[in-house]
Image (cartoon, rainbow, N blue to C red):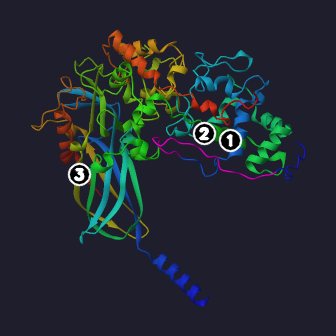
């Protein structure tokens, strides 16, 4: 009996000494230097656009320390950049992870999109509230999750009427993009570290030569055989993602 | 207030309700404080079909949610006590357990339990005061027994609105439908569409580059046939976003860009749920298809996927044939679902 009590005390002491802290990933939409507010006009070179629906599936999220030891944060998350006013846009969406071992991490890893094994599943395989249970982010015709949605309205004639609907949905295995961001992330005991990640839509909607997408000519993508514009969009993540801690 | 009736002599032996979720369906969350039991469902079933919840005992939940019409009522907008006319069409309750993005056309309730509070006290629906409902139920011997069996209460005074909406919610969570031809073909192994249905299916889901994209699958896909998102589908012509006669989602969020947006309903059993749209403006599925084929009315928040489709008469007919594959009334054989007073 005495041994059991001592063991219990030992476990309690060890548990209370456990070195853990919390970590927040804070995603925010950006247009150039401004927090991106939905339904607000932005100038994409010579076309005025308003974004209406911005979201993406994030998978395989982890942080890595100098010893290349990885802490998995989540298999999948859904991020919606749906700030409809300045305060909401500046707040962005926070993904919270608790009980992370303390220490200094040097890398954040994640994928925008869904890895092949998970992309072979369907929303019906998950709970309705799971990020991968969202049927609005699954496209039957592709047999794929929709990795990201960029939807909005454009005023191509300059008459103040945003009557050209545009949407760029990415999906299918070839369009997922994985990232390793070198960034020092210090997890302290009993405190919360936050890393801000910005996605600049001014960078996202550009061709390889830096010119803006011709939204008027290609306002939508839906033909699996014409993936040029969305391939360019996912390739642009590399320059559109900006990080701040 | 009386001292109530002692109910402890009545047997209380809760048994989990064996809810049958089709293999191809996602799972849903059952609240920890409201597990589904056979006696809980039985109580909810009685409450759902009993006009006792209304001011003059003339209207029940089932008045606007008829099981044979996939729990809609077949009219454009529903009628409550005193013939009061509501402002929106009754929504189907089929697979409502999966609602995760708000209930009602505008999403103003987040849970079934919160939703069930509203119709009783709505001045256009049951027009009753919850205090009165509680008193009526506490005095009713049938309900004394049913509440005891469902929740283990010791005294009839423990019958509350909270337990009432919990029981109704338990009942609603078992309204599962997943055995239509659509389910059997898409997720089973031994069924096939007709040529017309298959053509309709390919247009619905944009699955064949040789047929037009009818754009339906963006808002209605998977086994639940809804994405549960809020959209302006272009049915209302307005001068500007402030002019929608029914602001829908905007009424809840206060965001002008949400004006005129409504929750995309399930298309399961759509052939049984006429008339269509939040205000029941379309009497037939043919009219609905015609609307989407037209591209709808422009507004800045018109969904990007609503656009003229250019479907031929034959293609529209094929689409209609596919919509009819979504009918499933097998739930009507479940004695826990049908009217217990019949």
* Residue B8 percent location from the top left of the image: 85, 53
Residue A186: horizontal and vertical position, in percent? 32, 67
The quadrant where residue B130 appears: top right
**Residue, x 34% and y 14% (percent of image)?**
B315
* Same-chain check, marks 3 and 1: no
Of residues B196 and B93, the one nearer the viewer is B196
Q: Earlier in the sequence, mark 1 or mark 2?
A: 1
The residue singled out by tag 2 in the image is: B174
In the structure shown, which secondary structural element does the residue marked by tag 2 occupy? loop
Q: Quadrant of residue B159?
A: top right
**Magenta highlight: main SS:** loop
Residue that extends furthest to the bottom in the rendered view of this protein: A2
Residue furthest to the top: B313
| Label 3 crowd bin: few (<14), some (14–19), many (20+), radius 10 Å | some
Above/below status of B5 relative to B186: below
Please say whether residue B15 is one of the residues in the magenta stretch.
Answer: yes
Residue depicted at 55% across the width and 21% down the height: B272
Query: Tags 3 and 1 in contact by the CB under 8 Å rule?
Result: no
Q: CA distance from mark 2 to mark 3?
A: 41 Å
Q: Which residues are magenta?
A: B11-28
The subunit carrying tag 3 is A
Q: Is residue B59 left or right of residue A89?
A: right
Tag 1–tag 2 contact (CB < 8 Å): yes
Residue at the left extreme? Answer: A209
Position of residue A58 relative to residue A181, above or below, is: above
Which dot marks residue B41?
Answer: 1
Q: Which mark is residue A178?
A: 3
Q: Which quadrant is home to the C terminus of chain A?
A: bottom left
Which mark's residue is nearer the viewer, 2 or 3? 2
Q: Is residue B130 visible?
A: yes
Between marks 1 and 2, how big is the CA–CA gap? 8 Å
């Amino acid at each position: 009996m005495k041994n059991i009590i001592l063991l219990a005390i030992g476990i309690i002491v060890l548990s209370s000494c456990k070195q853990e802290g919390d970590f927040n990933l804070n995603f925010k939409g950006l247009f150039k230097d401004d927090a991106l507010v939905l339904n607000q006009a932005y100038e994409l070179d010579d076309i005025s656009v308003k974004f209406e629906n911005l979201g993406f599936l994030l998978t395989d999220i982890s942080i890595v320390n100098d010893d290349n030891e990885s802490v998995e944060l989540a298999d999948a998350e859904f991020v919606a950049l749906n700030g409809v006013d300045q305060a909401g846009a500046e707040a962005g969406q926070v993904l919270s992870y608790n009980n992370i071992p303390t220490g200094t991490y040097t890398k954040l890893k994640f994928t925008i999109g869904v890895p092949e094994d998970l992309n072979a599943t369907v929303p019906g395989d998950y709970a309705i509230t799971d990020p991968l249970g969202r049927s609005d982010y699954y496209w039957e015709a592709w047999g794929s999750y929709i990795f990201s949605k960029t939807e909005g309205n454009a005023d191509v004639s300059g008459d103040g009427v945003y009557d050209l609907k545009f949407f760029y949905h990415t999906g299918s295995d070839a369009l997922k993009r994985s990232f390793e961001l070198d960034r020092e992330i210090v997890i302290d005991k009993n405190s919360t570290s936050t890393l801000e990640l910005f996605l600049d839509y001014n960078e996202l909607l550009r061709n390889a030569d830096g010119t803006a997408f011709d939204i008027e000519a290609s306002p939508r993508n839906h033909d699996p055989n014409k993936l040029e514009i969305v391939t360019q969009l996912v390739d642009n993540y590399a320059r559109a993602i900006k990080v701040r801690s | 207030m009386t001292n109530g009736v002692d109910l402890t002599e009545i047997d209380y032996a809760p048994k989990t309700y064996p809810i049958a979720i089709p293999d191809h369906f996602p799972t849903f969350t059952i609240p920890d404080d409201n597990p589904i039991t056979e006696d809980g469902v039985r109580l909810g079933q009685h409450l759902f079909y009993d006009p006792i919840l209304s001011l003059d005992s003339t209207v029940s939940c089932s008045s606007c949610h008829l099981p044979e019409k996939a729990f809609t009522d077949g009219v454009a907008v529903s009628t409550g006590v005193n013939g009061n006319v509501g402002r929106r069409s009754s929504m189907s309750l089929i697979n409502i357990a999966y609602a995760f993005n708000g209930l009602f056309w505008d999403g103003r309730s987040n849970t079934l339990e919160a939703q069930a509070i509203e119709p009783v006290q709505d001045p256009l629906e049951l027009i009753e005061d919850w205090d009165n409902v509680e008193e009526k139920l506490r005095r009713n011997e049938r309900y004394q027994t049913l509440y005891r069996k469902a929740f283990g209460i010791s005294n009839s005074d423990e019958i509350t609105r909270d337990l009432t909406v919990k029981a109704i919610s338990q009942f609603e969570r078992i309204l599962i439908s997943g055995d239509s031809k659509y389910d059997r073909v898409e997720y089973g192994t031994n069924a096939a569409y007709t040529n017309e249905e298959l053509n309709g299916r390919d247009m619905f889901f944009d699955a064949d580059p040789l047929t037009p994209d009818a754009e339906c699958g963006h808002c209605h896909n998977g086994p639940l046939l809804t994405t549960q998102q809020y959209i302006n589908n272009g049915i209302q012509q307005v001068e500007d976003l402030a002019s929608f006669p029914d602001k829908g989602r905007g009424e809840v969020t206060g965001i002008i860009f949400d004006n005129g947006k409504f929750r995309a309903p399930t298309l399961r059993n759509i052939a049984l749920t006429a008339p269509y749209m939040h205000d029941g403006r379309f009497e037939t599925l043919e009219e609905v298809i015609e609307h989407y084929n037209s591209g709808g009315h422009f507004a800045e928040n018109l969904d990007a996927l609503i656009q003229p489709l250019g479907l031929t008469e034959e293609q529209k007919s094929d689409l209609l044939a596919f919509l009819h594959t979504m009918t499933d009334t097998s739930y009507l054989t479940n004695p826990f679902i049908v009217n217990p007073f019949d």
